[in-house]
Amino acid sequence: MIRVVQKNPHSAFRIPHSTKGIVYLVGAGPGDPKLITVKGLEMLKRANVVIYDHLISKRLLEHCQPNAKLIYVGKEGGSDPKGRKSRLSRLGSDPSTSQRAINRLLVREAKKGKIVVRLKGGDPVLFGRGGEEALALAKANVLFEIVPGVTSAIAVPAYAGIPVTHRKLSSSVAMVTGHEDPSKPDTAIRWDRLASATDTLVCLMGVGTLAKTVEQLIRYGRSQEAPCAVIEWGTLPNQRTVAGTLSTIARRCEHARLKPPAIVVVGEVVKLRHWLAWFERKPLFGKRIVVTRPADRAEELGGLLEELGAQVIRLPAIELAPMKVNGLFRRTVRDMGQFDWVFFTSPEGIHWFGRLLRSQRKDVRVLSGRHIGVIGPKTAASIQDLGIHVDFIPKRFSQEGILDGLKARRVTGKRALILSAKGSRDVLEGGLRRLGMEVTRVPIYRTVVPSALQQGVQEIVPACHDDRRAGRRQPIDLVTVTSSSCVDHFAEALEAAGVADTIRHLRFASIGPVTSATVRERGGRIVIEAKTSTIEGLVEAIVALGRQGGGKRRGIPSLSTSQAS
């Protein structure tokens, strides 16, 4: 199918280009979106049109221009990522027909004067039909460039702890395809010459023909005891590796139910996996963790979890929106000098405060002479980055912590200003009044429910249940929550989707006791609570719990009653 997604056409950002278009055949790498080359990413950011395949990471497409045209041409299984039937698959039974349609599309878009990126998995010319596409462009007199990519033939074994060469074990390597053009009457692979010609053999897309490949290798001289490994979904957090020998590998893969995409490695270097399997030993490897932070803040937590091996599902449960400047805000800014203390309860607060000030042709200099109190180090850092000194950070990073810390200070009779989100907890306001302070609270931003949350929840809900009858383990290991608003919005989305009861089947990792209390009120279960209420503290708590479980690959280990909070 060719599926077109037109991104925002009203973006002011435009890349100048000549009236003569060009096509960049770009290798996206083997799966991990960070393995794209610097030049490949640069071309992706410049492109007006991106034509991409089935296994391309959605994270890569986020780098495209806001007004870029995205065209999906995946042919895997005759479906696109949304499960709709592929139009390409109906153009004819000959797979080359579909390829001809892609070639025509490349030529047509380039001749419109567009910068076109043909984004292909791995390397574009290693079993990727990039050579065919380049020939079609050359015949049509269309400018093109080939941007090599990291090939799965080398990267996937490396992620499984298998270097394809080693000075003492392998000085040669051959790469073959296990998925030849089905229209060819016979195989073009000379197994009689290839079987024992090199120390290491890498077979791409070879899991479907594994038994036949093994038979040919043994028939033409490769030892039945030759070490062999098959790697599924290589370089991704759901990577699986099955190792054995040529005589056992097919049976082991069948037992493990390995499916494409997978590659096969044969050779003595497979034995090194015992010592070098670095990726699968990451502390959170294989764990699927939902991050509910706002989209513009999710990367801080999501990036840390991914570095530790987790598969992160970004599902923002909260979105921040500005408040309109009103009389209360204008009077507060005008009379800022009357306040002794100004409190910020989130890192976002200083951002939205500055934004409102700019609309009034003012800036944070209005805070000059005020004592600044914050809820934690991240909020303090966002203020100190502006050159403003922070006078008070509590030991416990919460509104309650602020109140505990202020008890030792003389604040009776002082005047306080709280700049926070509309509808946020009023613990600080009430507590300061009890300490004898005169308090003014001004909302400077508001939280709203993201429009895509309900759809996102519906997509993960089938994965939230432990379906023992189907022999499946719980695929969603954790849902991370960093505020009560995140919890409330997430629960409301489940309710709107008609699956409110699902919250009981989820395991939550909370940033602190206040957020944990909200999870429990909503019927959820806390299995992890950060000792320090920061993103780093939350990640440390998740890793610590994973280590208690002995590094299990899937699922956060079950907790005893004494461990669960």
Image: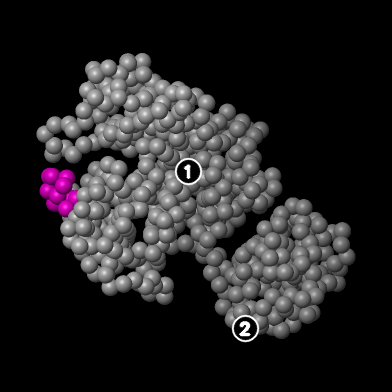
Q: Residue at x 18, y 39 (%)?
A: 181
Work out whether 52 lies above or below 556: below
Q: Which residue is mark 1?
A: 311
Q: Is residue 70 positioned above or below 363 on the image?
A: above
Q: Is residue 529 visible?
A: no
Q: Which mark is residue 360?
A: 2
Up/down of 18 relative to 157, above or below? below
Residue 215 horizontal/vertical position (percent): 24, 20
Badge 1, how many Cα within 10 Å: few under 14, some, many 20+? many
* Image coordinates for residue 79, horizontal then vertical, percent: 25, 48
**Frontmost residue, 301 versus 526:** 301
Q: Amino acid at mark 1?
A: Gln
What secondary structure is found at the residue carrying circle 1? strand
Q: What residue sits 65% from the left and 68% below the top?
A: 350
Residue 29 in view (yes/no): yes
Q: For the point 47% across and 53% down, which residue is it? A: 315
Q: In the image, residue 524 lies at what x, y percent?
A: 55, 45
Query: Residue 343's x, y, as percent?
Result: 73, 67
Of residues 400 and 546, the one nearer the viewer is 546
User: To which quarter of the image does residue 378 belong?
Assistant: bottom right
The correct choice, above or below, for 563 with respect to 38 in the image is above
Q: Magenta part of the protein: which range?
A: 91-100
Is 264 situated left or right of 534 in this image? left
161 within the magenta span: no
